[in-house]
Amino acid sequence: NSSTPNCHQAVLFLTRVTNTDIGEYSFIVRSPNGLSEGVFIVNMTYASGYIVKSACGSLSATFYVNVVVLLILTCCY
């Protein structure tokens, strides 16, 4: 919470984060009161007892994305 009247907090949830998502990201926020920018860093740590999936998990994710793209192309064209 902030004491500035036009200042608000926001939350960004990232799901299905992989090692390829690690890095620094920039963002810009625009409102009637002006522009603001910021930077956030995505890093990965594993909780104790967490089991990391093998490469098969990334293959199924790639397959899922390809199916979604094909469905969109089929519906729209």
Image: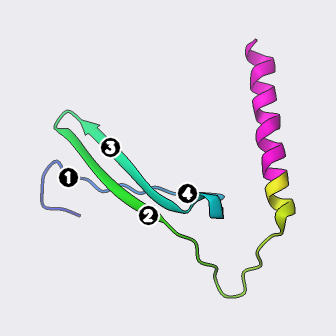
Looking at the rendered structure, the kind of residue marked 1 is Cys
**Left or right: 11 with respect to 45?**
left
Image quarter where the N terminus lies is bottom left
For mark 4, what is the residue? 14
For mark 1, what is the residue? 7
Is residue 63 part of the magenta span, yes or no?
Answer: yes
**Left or right: 45 with respect to 32?**
right
Residue 41, disc:
2
Mark 2 and mark 3: Cα distance apart in space: 15 Å
Categorize mark 4 by other alpha carbons within 10 Å: few (<14), some (14-19), many (20+). few
Percent position of residue 42, x then y: 50, 64
Percent position of residue 17, x then y: 62, 60
For mark 3, what is the residue? 28
Looking at the image, residue 33 lies above or below residue 48: above
Mark 4 and mark 1: Cα distance apart in space: 23 Å
**Left or right: 74 with respect to 21?**
right
Q: What residue range appears in magenta?
A: 60-77
Percent position of residue 58, x then y: 79, 57
Looking at the image, residue 7 lies above or below residue 40: above
Categorize mark 3 by other alpha carbons within 10 Å: few (<14), some (14-19), many (20+). few
